[in-house]
Image (cartoon, grey):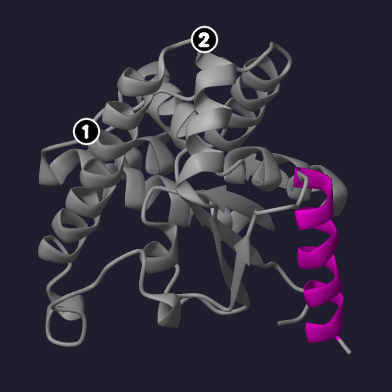
Amino acid sequence: MDKNKKFVITVNRELGSGGRTVGRKLAERLGVKYFDKALIEGLTKEFNLTVEEIERIKAQKSSWWNEFNMYYKKRYDVLLPLETETVLTTASMIGTEQRILQDLASHESCVVAGRSSFLVFREWPNHLNIFIQAPLEKRIERIMRKRQIGREETIATIEKVDKARETYIKKFVEINPELQSSLQNVSRYDTRNYDLVINMDGLSEDEAVDIIMQYFERCNK
């Protein structure tokens, strides 16, 4: 990985692990943009995007990148809400997210959180895939504290989100035929998909970022 060229760092994570915060802090430390589900869904709604619409806008509207940057600044100038989960069930929506992420990454270096990004950028030049996990009890405690909900509701939420994210990955593979022969049983929990796996047990988000930065710098020696 060459930090002097455009790069992509993907941060996939378990709900409640603190991985979303790690990704955001990592982007801040590196001085690059941070893309996550909230941004991509907001961008899709803002510009009414589909795969076809992306191509039309790029062809007819040279100011699209400037408009995106304005939207990005507006989106991150306000306090981000707590993470919520929706399940995208259509191939067209998943395909649109994939195209948006790849188009954004083609413009500049970035950190991408979730959205099957370890698959989206699987063949991308100059990329680093990271997975953030945590013990179940730590995940439960974090979600209960942040969302102010009870233990049973928290456990149900974790189970629902874990299942939804695995389903999302399977749908991603379904719409990318070139992946099907080599990734028939793909799972985000398969550590072979990542260059670096971090267990947050006993670590703060800043300490996790320190570990990633050390690894990043070592890759550039």
Q: Amino acid at mark 2?
A: Gln
Q: Residues within 10 Å of mark 1 (few under 14, many from 20)?
A: few
Q: Which residue is the site of mark 2?
A: 148
Question: Any magenta on residue 113?
Answer: no
Which tag is nearer the camera, tag 2 or tag 1? 2
Question: On screen, 203 above or below 92?
Answer: below
Secondary element under disc 2, as helix, strand or loop, is loop
Q: Taking the image as drawn, is residue 36 in sight?
A: no
Residue 203 at x, y percent in the picture: 75, 52
Q: On the rendered image, what quadrant is the N terminus found in?
A: bottom right
Label 1 near label 2: C-beta < 8 Å?
A: no
- Return the residue nearer the eye: 86 or 3: 86
Q: Amino acid at mark 1?
A: Val
Gap between marks 2 and 1 measured at Cα: 23 Å
The magenta region covers: 205-220
Residue 151 falls left or right of residue 125? left
Question: On screen, 205 above or below 127?
Answer: above
Residue 148 at x, y percent in the picture: 51, 9
Going 41% across and 14% down the picture, which residue do you hit?
150
Secondary element under disc 1, as helix, strand or loop, is loop
Residue 167 at x, y percent in the picture: 17, 50
- Return the residue nearer the eye: 193 or 99: 193
Q: Of callouts 2 and 1, which one flags the residue occurring earlier in the amino acid sequence?
A: 1
Q: Which residue is the site of mark 1?
A: 87
- Return the residue nearer the eye: 149 or 3: 149
Residue 200 falls left or right of residue 138? right
- The image quarter in which residue 145 lies: top right
Q: Taking the image as drawn, is residue 124 in sight?
A: yes
In this rendering, the count of numbered labels is 2
